[in-house]
């Protein structure tokens, strides 16, 4: 995922207001967190755009499976420690007060058992009274085979266009990303990559959190209108 397009990731997602989203995350943490520490782990951190803003209030750690995205994140936030690992199987040997998993990252677990496993791993890294904030990926009833979307950005020295063709088979969601990247120096090049995610229901997310003995709050609006699931580890 984003292996070929890492260099263009931030450009193609420039429509997102990461600063505003980080402010919402901060408010929700202070509303629901019961522990007193400020250590935060961002799972599926990508290029570190949320971390860029969250590091002002928290001692942040980033984790992602993609080394190319992590290189960009480290350049953006050189004082932050980053780990390359899969969210369903990581062991950092620490516990934190907050775990975030934002912007569709959770969908890459692909299956319900792996969603449940990812939450088990996250809980092991969470202090009593800490909170997990999960922004869901596409919902089962939101995507349809044959849907075509296009994202375009024009920069002074580079134009990037990404056409996305969506396919759904049961709970499996596939997005074929087709890129055209043009610069005055190199001309126009084409490449493609495939993204595979799982489609989960509201009850799937609730069940995975409850299964791990977390108190659960569902914020209906969330960061972008898709909602946000908050799991709170009870105090011992």
Image (cartoon, rainbow, N blue to C red):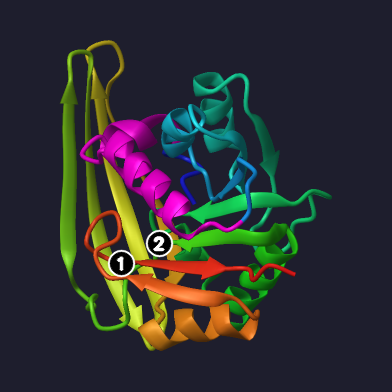
Left/right of residue 52 with respect to residue 234 in the rendered view? left
Where residue 128 is drawn, which disc sits there? none
**Observer-nearest residue: 41 or 187?**
41
Where residue 227 is drawn, which disc sits there? 1
Question: Magenta residues, as a range?
Answer: 6-34
Image x and y of residue 33, in percent? 53, 57
**Observer-nearest residue: 227 or 15?**
227
Residue under the image location 79 percent in, 48 percent down = 94
Image x and y of residue 207, in percent? 52, 86
> Going from the N terminus, do you reach mark 1 or mark 2 first?
2
Residue under the image location 32 percent in, 82 percent down = 140
**Observer-nearest residue: 152 or 32?**
32
Query: Is residue 190 in view from this perspective?
Result: no
Q: From this view, report whether residue 136 is shown above or below residue 14.
A: below
Find out whether residue 30 is within the magenta segment.
yes
Left/right of residue 95 with respect to residue 232 in the rendered view? right
10 Å neighbourhood of mark 2: few (<14), some, or many (≥20)? Answer: many
Residue under the image location 18 percent in, 32 percent down = 153
Cα distance between the residues tagged 1 and 2: 7 Å
- Which SS does the magenta portion mostly show? helix
Image x and y of residue 84, in percent? 69, 43
Dot 1: element = loop
The C terminus, quarter of image: bottom right
Left/right of residue 34 with respect to residue 200 in the rendered view? right
Are discs 1 and 2 less than 8 Å apart at CB?
yes
Residue under the image location 73 percent in, 62 percent down = 89
Quarter location, residue 21: top left
Q: From this view, report whether residue 59 is shown above or below residue 228.
A: above
Instruction: Report the residue marked by disc 2.
Output: 135
10 Å neighbourhood of mark 1: few (<14), some, or many (≥20)? Answer: some
Query: Is residue 73 in view from this perspective?
Result: yes
Dot 2: element = loop
């Amino acid at each position: 995922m984003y292996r070929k397009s890492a260099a263009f990731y931030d450009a193609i997602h420039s429509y997102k207001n990461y600063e505003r989203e980080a402010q919402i995350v901060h408010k929700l943490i202070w509303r629901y967190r019961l522990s007193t520490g400020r250590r935060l782990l961002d799972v599926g951190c990508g290029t570190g755009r949320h971390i860029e803003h969250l590091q002002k209030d928290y001692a942040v750690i980033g984790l992602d499976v993609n080394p190319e995205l992590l290189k960009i994140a480290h350049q953006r936030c050189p004082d932050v420690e980053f780990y390359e690992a899969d969210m369903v199987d990581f062991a950092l040997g620490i516990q934190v007060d907050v775990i975030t998993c934002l912007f569709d990252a959770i969908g890459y677990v692909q299956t319900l058992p792996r969603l449940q496993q990812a939450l088990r791993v996250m809980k092991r890294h969470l202090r009593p009274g800490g909170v997990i904030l999960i922004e869901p990926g596409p919902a089962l009833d939101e995507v349809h085979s044959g849907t075509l979307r296009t994202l375009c950005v024009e920069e002074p020295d580079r134009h990037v266009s990404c056409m996305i063709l969506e396919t759904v088979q049961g709970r499996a969601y596939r997005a074929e990303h087709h890129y055209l990247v043009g610069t005055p120096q190199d001309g126009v090049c084409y490449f493609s990559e495939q993204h595979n995610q799982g489609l989960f229901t509201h009850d799937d997310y609730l069940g995975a959190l409850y299964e791990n003995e977390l108190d659960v709050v569902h914020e209906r609006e969330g960061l972008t209108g898709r909602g946000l699931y908050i799991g709170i580890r009870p105090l011992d």
